[in-house]
């Protein structure tokens, strides 16, 4: 018999062994967590202590194997309210200690149950501290997870045959198949077209709370189709892939700017904004992913703790206004850990804001909510532009 309050190990038989192999040959052992099988992607680490459900369902993580740095994952289970999209998008999930039993009153099933139901291959009992340190030192790289292959050399060969994230155009793989409308809550004040490059469900909800009727459209939408909706503003969402490999959204945004429609972009929408203004982009060593990234607003000097998920960044001069065909562009926000560009602002000849973007996530449902005011700022920009029209 087991002691009172304890759990017999026979109730939780050991899962199958699993193998993780990075493209540089580093190998980690563990056990299957979620679906049994094999998966490949780019290995990245996320530093959030909570919010794993929002992370796993974020389309920006498409083709990425996410390593959780928090040591204990799954204790809040899985509910039916917090998904950021209609499915889990990560290519794989790696954790150290997986909770055996969820304990949240909101949970409807366990995390592993959901991973298994959606066919997502993962690993547990992995030394995620050592894995994270390796990725921090060597950079994000291709990886393979397998609970069916036992030969590291064979798995490594398949890892090196998979495509890299650099040069990947992925927005069309995650965008909505058809346009849809999220109605405004209460009185409709404005209409905004949101170009879905991998949008999270919380984003149109944040705008709807502010009286905005949101028309979410596919990433391949033409400017003529957007103009036909007579929007008061245009929004470009977050999304996966290499911004330098993305062309149609850049040309689409340039048409929006030429038409003098107020603009707001988040994450991938910030990178596309940078490219539309004439800046380059580059791949970060290991990226920013987590709920605890400090960013400074250079206009107010206010520091915000923000949620991030990006492996690429805009290459723009900090503190130096740049003339563009659409007005004067400046870097508005910087990351305090590494001085990465975290926001852009575009003003016209009279000094009025025409558009702005941030690299981080003001809509982050799991928090923090320091940057939530940016949705109010979008409303203010639309209102100000209409006042002088």
Image (cartoon, rainbow, N blue to C red):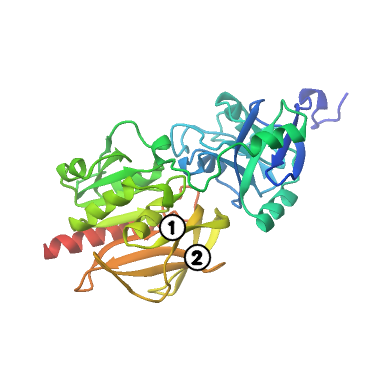
Q: Is residue 182 left or right of residue 13?
A: left
Q: Residues within 10 Å of mark 2 (few under 14, many from 20)?
A: many
What residue is drawn where x is 47% and y is 45%?
A: 241
Q: Residues within 10 Å of mark 1 (few under 14, many from 20)?
A: many
C-beta proximity under 8 Å, tags 2 and 1: yes
Q: Is residue 247 left or right of residue 318?
A: left
Q: Is residue 323 left or right of residue 109?
A: left
Q: Quadrant of residue 298?
A: bottom left
Helix, strand or loop at label 2? It is loop
Does 65 sit above or below residue 151?
below
- Percent x, y for residue 342? 45, 63
What residue is drawn where x is 15% and y is 42%?
A: 228
Farthest-out residue, left: 389
Q: CA distance from mark 2 to mark 1?
A: 9 Å
Farthest-out residue, right: 1
The numbered mark at residue 359 is 1
What residue is drawn where x is 43% and y is 58%?
A: 359
Asked if residue 336 shows in the view, the reply is yes
Q: Quadrant of residue 117?
A: top right
The answer to which of 285 and 14 lies nearer the viewer is 285
- Percent x, y for residue 143? 65, 41
> Which residue does the numbered mark 2 point to in the structure image?
340
The numbered mark at residue 323 is none
Q: Quadrant of residue 327?
A: bottom left
Q: Is residue 242 left or right of residue 133?
A: left
């Amino acid at each position: 018999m087991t002691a009172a309050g304890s759990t017999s190990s026979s109730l939780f038989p050991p899962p199958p062994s699993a193998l993780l192999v990075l493209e540089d040959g580093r190998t980690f052992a563990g056990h299957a967590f979620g679906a049994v099988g094999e998966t490949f992607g780019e290995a990245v680490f996320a530093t959030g202590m909570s919010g794993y459900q929002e992370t796993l369902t974020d389309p920006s993580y498409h083709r990425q194997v996410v390593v959780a740095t928090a040591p204990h994952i799954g204790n809040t289970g899985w509910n039916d309210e917090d998904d950021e999209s209609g499915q889990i998008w990560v290519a794989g999930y790696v954790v150290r200690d997986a909770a055996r039993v969820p304990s949240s009153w909101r949970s409807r099933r366990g995390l592993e149950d959901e991973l298994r139901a959606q066919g997502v291959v993962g690993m547990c009992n992995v030394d995620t501290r050592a894995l994270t340190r390796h990725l921090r030192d060597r950079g994000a790289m291709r990886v393979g997870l397998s609970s069916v292959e036992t030969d590291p050399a064979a798995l490594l060969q398949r890892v090196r045959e998979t495509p890299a994230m650099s040069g990947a155009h992925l927005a069309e793989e995650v965008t909505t198949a058809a346009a849809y409308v999220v109605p405004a809550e209460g009185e409709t004040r404005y209409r905004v077209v949101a170009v879905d490059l991998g949008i999270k469900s919380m984003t149109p909800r944040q705008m709807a709370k502010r009286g905005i009727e949101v028309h979410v459209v596919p990433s391949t939408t033409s400017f003529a189709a957007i103009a036909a909706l007579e929007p008061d503003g245009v929004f470009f969402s977050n999304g996966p892939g290499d911004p330098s490999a993305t062309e149609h959204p850049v040309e689409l945004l340039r048409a929006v700017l030429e038409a003098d429609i107020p603009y707001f972009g988040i994450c991938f929408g910030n990178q596309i904004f940078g490219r539309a203004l004439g800046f380059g982009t580059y791949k970060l060593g290991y990226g920013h992913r987590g709920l605890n990234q400090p960013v400074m607003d250079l206009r107010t000097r206010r520091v915000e703790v923000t949620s991030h998920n990006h492996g690429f960044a805009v290459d723009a001069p900090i503190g130096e206004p740049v003339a563009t065909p659409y007005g004067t562009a400046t870097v508005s926000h910087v990351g305090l850990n590494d001085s990465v560009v975290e926001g852009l602002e575009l003003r016209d000849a009279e000094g009025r804001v025409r558009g702005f973007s941030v690299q981080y996530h003001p809509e982050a449902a799991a928090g923090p909510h320091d940057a939530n005011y940016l949705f109010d700022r979008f409303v203010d920009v639309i209102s100000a532009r209409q006042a002088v029209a």
